[in-house]
Structure formats: C-alpha cells, structure tokens
Image: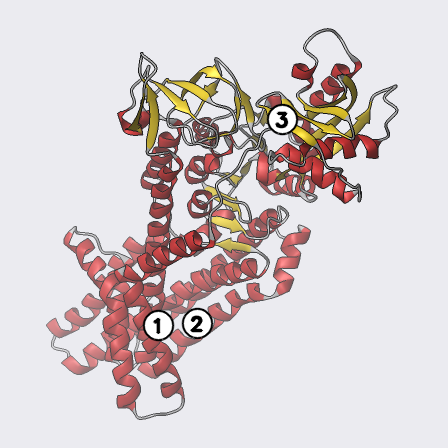
Amino acid sequence: MASTLTRPAETGAAREAVTARRRTRIFALPETRWAAAALTLFLIALPLHMAGAPAWSWGALFAAVYATGGWEPGWAGLRALRGRTLDVDLLMVVAALGAAAIGQLLDGALLIVIFATSGALEAIATARTADSVRGLLDLAPTTATRLSADGGEECVPTDELRIGDVVLVRPGERIGADGSVVEGASEVDQATITGEPLPVAKETGDEVFAGTLNGTGSLRVKVGRDPADSVIARIVAMVEEASETKAPTQLFIEKVEQRYSLGMVAATVALFALPLLFGAALQPTLLRAMTFMIVASPCAVVLATMPPLLSAIANAGRHGVLVKSAVVMERLGQVDAAALDKTGTLTEGTPKVTDIRPLVGSGLDESELLRLAAAVEHPSEHPLARAIVDAARARDSAVPSVEDFTSAPGTGVRATVSGRTVAVGSPTRLLKAGAHEGLAVAADLEEAGRTAVLVAVDGTPVGVLGIADRLREDAADAVAALARLTGTAPILLTGDNPRAAVGLAEEVGITDVRAGLLPQDKVTAVKELERAGRKVLVVGDGVNDAPALAAAHTGVAMGRAGSDLALETADAVVVRDELAAIPAVIALSRRARRLVVQNLVIAATFIAGLAVWDLAGRLPLPLGVAGHEGSTVIVGLNGLRLLADGAWRRARSGRER
C-alpha cells in the first residue's frame, strides 16, 4: 500500500501567473471595458445630479453613460433586428433614449448600466469556463517514452501514440495514454478521473488513464485508446458540448420579452402616427407618445426581477455560497432532484484512521500499535502513511526513528524499529497464504467500507488499522434537507468502489448508490433523470465531476478543494464547504422567485393603469413619471427584503419552501 507518491505542487508564482492571465483576459473583453466605463461615469454623475450641480456637468456624464454602456446591447439589438427579431436589449436602449428625450436622464442611465453590467458578467463567465476547459488538457503530458520491439526508447509527442504502442512510465510521471499495464507494479493517483481519494495499486492487466499520476513503481503500458479518445479528452469534449448545447437560460420576464417588445413599440408608434393622420398637432402628440413609452417601458419590470435575485445572491455570498448570476439563482429554486459526489463532497477528501485493532496475543495496545505503524510510515509520502502519522501525533505519541526503510509498490513498507522488523501494508499481500485472524479483521473493516492496513512485527501480524475518508459533520442533515426540498432522496454518483460507497451512503441515508463511475457515466446518470422530467442539481468538486456539473440543470461545486474546472463549470460554489448551505440557498432561491412574482404583479398593475390612463385620457407627464418611478421604488424595496440575515436563517432552518 505504501509508496512515496508525490503530487506536483503548484507554486505561488504559478498561481499568480494563472490569476494574472485571467485578469488580463477579463479586461480584454469589450463587454467588460464598456460596462466598467459606464458604471464609473454613472457613479461620478449621480452625486453631482443629487447635489444640484449645473445640468451641463452631470448631463454630459450621463450622455457618456449612454454611449459607453449602450453600445454593446444596442449593437446586439440591431443585429437581432436585422434577423427580424426584436429583443429586450434594443428595447432597453430605446426606452433609455425615450427617457432622455423627456428629461429623465438618470432613469435611462440606470437602465443602461444594469444591462451593460449583466452582459459583461455573462461574457466573463463564458470566457473563464473556456479557459478552464483548455487548462484541463494540461493534465495530460505532451510527451511519452515509447518502447520499440528491440527494447529501445524514444521520446514522442503523445498525440503520435497509436493503439498497441507500449510506453514506459517512470516513477512520478503522468501516464501519457489510456491503456493497460503489461509489466510492472505501482500505485496510481487517478483522482482526476475517478475521484477516488487514495492511489490505486496497479499491476499487469490493470487499466490506467492518461493524465493520472504514477507512484514509485515503473510501469509498461500498452496503449488501448487513441489519445484523442482518452478519458481526459472526452471530459473536455463533454464539458464543451454541454456548455454549447445546454438550452439558453432566461429570467422569467425574458420569456415574454419578444411579445412585450413588439406590443410596446407598436402601441407607441400607433399612438404617435394615428393622431397625426387625423390632423393632431405634432408637439402634444409626440409628448403623449413619449409619456406612453415611459410608463409602459419595462424599467419597473426589470427591477421587479433583479433586486430579489441579486439580494438573494448577496445574502448567499455573505454566508459562503457564490451564485454566479441571477439566472442561476432562479434555476436553483427549480431543482427537484439531487445527485451528489462522494469524495470531497459528502466526505472531507482526506483519509483518517478510524479503527485500531490489535490482534489477540500481540501484547500491544492501540497506542503502541499505532506508534509502530507511524514509525515505519513516517518516511513515506503516501496519503495512507500521512493519515497514520497524523493519527499518532494526535495522540501525542512519540514516533521513533527507523532504519533500513524499503518500499514495495502495491505491497507496503518495511523498516527496522528498535531492532525489530516492522512491515505495514496490504493484508492480502503481506499474508499470501492460509487463513489468519488478521485477514478476518481486515475483511470486516473492508466490508464496512474501510481501507485495511496490516501491521506485522518480525513476520508476525500484530494488528490491523482501518482508514477511511471522513464524512462531513453536516452531510446527513444536508441529505435529509435536500430530500425534503426536492421531494425525493438524493442519489450518490461516485468513481469510488461500491463497498466504500454503500457504507458511506448508509451513514447519510442515501439508498440509490451508483459507484465505480467514470465521468461519462455520471453524465449518463444525470441525463437519465432529466429525460424522466427531473431538474437535477449536481454537487461535486473534481475534474471528473465537471461534465456532470455542466450537463445538469444546476451544478454546485465545493470550493476549498475543488478543481479549477469544477469551480468554473459549476453554476454556484460553496466557498466554505458547508453542505448545509446548499439546501439553504435552494430555499432562499424559492423565496426570491415568489418575490419576483409579487413584484411583477405590482409592476404590471402600475404599467397597465398608467397606460390605460394615457390611452383613454390625458395623463400628465409629471404624474406618469411619478407613477412609473413609484412602482420602481416599491418593487425595488420589496426585493431588497432578502438582504436581511433573517431571510438566510429562515432558509437554513427549513422554513422556506
């Protein structure tokens, strides 16, 4: 079991380079530059306007807001118009210009800033996801050592490898292609593919994957798949496909934008043109049409939708959940099924010693058994070794020094401790023949989902340690809360072995367990649920979870140990790794959706009343503006109710449904 597996460390300089590259990419986006300029100009003009400064000062700044922030949505609207589609982007720009035409520069500028900022955030999210997908390819090495028939070696690009080639994988190298081991033994960290928390022993006949990390042994691998069809390449393809083919999501109000836009424009034109045909004067007719455009413009409708969702986003952010957009916040409240990853999601992702079993007649107590095992494992960097050493230190046990340390990949480690030869490793490999009490104890532990580690002194087994990935403290409560919210128990999707998965599922109350899954298998499971009409929430943390996160109705990533690809692909991130925050944010989303409906009713009532007044009689412009602004203030304040901590507490306690 032991090896000196070394994970490549990402240096501080590398992290800074990645961050700088992303920052450069973000500010290189035209949507970001225009939105930032519009927001800056608006924030400068607003205090001048409120302080009563000369109109030319703030007027010029608001005009610049129109130019900078309205450029991108206006151009997008014109392109849509060329395709015979009238969308809300163009409508917003026209409404803002209409507001400016009758002296309401502030209203129009605010509308421009809202839309420009929304477009910039969407562009940033798309660009960062694309960067992460491309970065995933870096997991696979660019070269491999190919062996010729006469035993010679040549370094070749991995994309030149062909099925049937044999490659040499030295200790500490990443495997260059999917295939099977034809010679050698080692342990391979394949967490990026399967999510398993511990390296897996590999020997002749076992399957290995490109991009996974070899331990201390040397392997000869026969290529079984073309590099372009490797599991890691398919993860990239699945994420890209899901991102491109996933139906575009829209806020509730945007689903009726086309009809509303056409109706409003047609009514405004008719209100202006028809009276002129019957001889009405130009100025009062234009004023009436502009009044109608203002009172019927969707400013209040936009604000009816956004404040509740943005308030919910802000509240969730204060409590450790990063929701990436208002669309995501709306979608969270729609989920009616949940699929959870195991390692790093329901568990902490770090193995811990859970059982210490001295064998009868060994003469050792738990502390002495753990101390001997820790002494031998101390020179090793294997995750199991670190777990044993950490457990001994937690008991304040002194770890003695050792001599003659040796490691056998896939078998274990051996060293001399105070004149005695102590071996720690795989029970089945250290006890190769015959029944033994140690094997029975190990079998019991493995049946319970533990990884069993045998300790032998001078060839005689003296005890067995059980090691497992520790369950998060709030896992069972979070699973129960998700079951209440969605109306069905979550399912477990994991690449780990079935025995470990079933054992953990029983602890948290999950009955539907699907184990031993590759990334594409997780996507298949999610799509099966969606074909059955479910809106699936997927929670995960690893590269292997990214395709399922992308394919799901809503994906949530665990933030602390989450891979870059999972964090960028997911729609929301649990920054503090608190599982209980997931059902809370779903409940908060559902309340936000209810407030959106309330606000839309309020906004529609005001718009309908003012529009009918203007059509049936003579609505004074100041009164129309006051009514329009009044409805905007009411729906805005109603939406801001979700900023209060009480809203989160009610959601966390389960009082929001």
Residue shown at the point (42%, 40%) measured from the top left: 550
Q: Residue 400 versus residue 558: which sits nearer the camera?
A: 400
- x then y, percent, for residue 437: 80, 14
Q: Amino acid at mark 1?
A: Leu
Residue shown at the point (40%, 90%) measured from the top left: 51
* Residue 14 in sight in this render: yes
Q: Which label's residue is closer to the chain start, 1 or 2?
A: 1
The residue carrying mark 3 is 406
Q: Residue 248 versus residue 404: which sits nearer the camera?
A: 404
The residue carrying mark 1 is 39
Residue 132 quadrant: top left
- x then y, percent, for residue 445: 73, 23
Measure the alpha-carbon separation of dots 3 and 1.
64 Å
**Rendered position, 27 above or below 338:** below
The residue carrying mark 2 is 631
Label 3 with label 2: CB-CB less than 8 Å:
no
- Number of other residues with Cα within 10 Å of mark 3, as a class: few under 14, some 14 to 19, many 20 or more: some
Label 1 with label 2: CB-CB less than 8 Å:
no
**Rendered position, 123 above or below 362:** below
- In the picture, the quarter occupied by the N terminus is top right
The secondary structure type at the circle numbered 1 is: helix
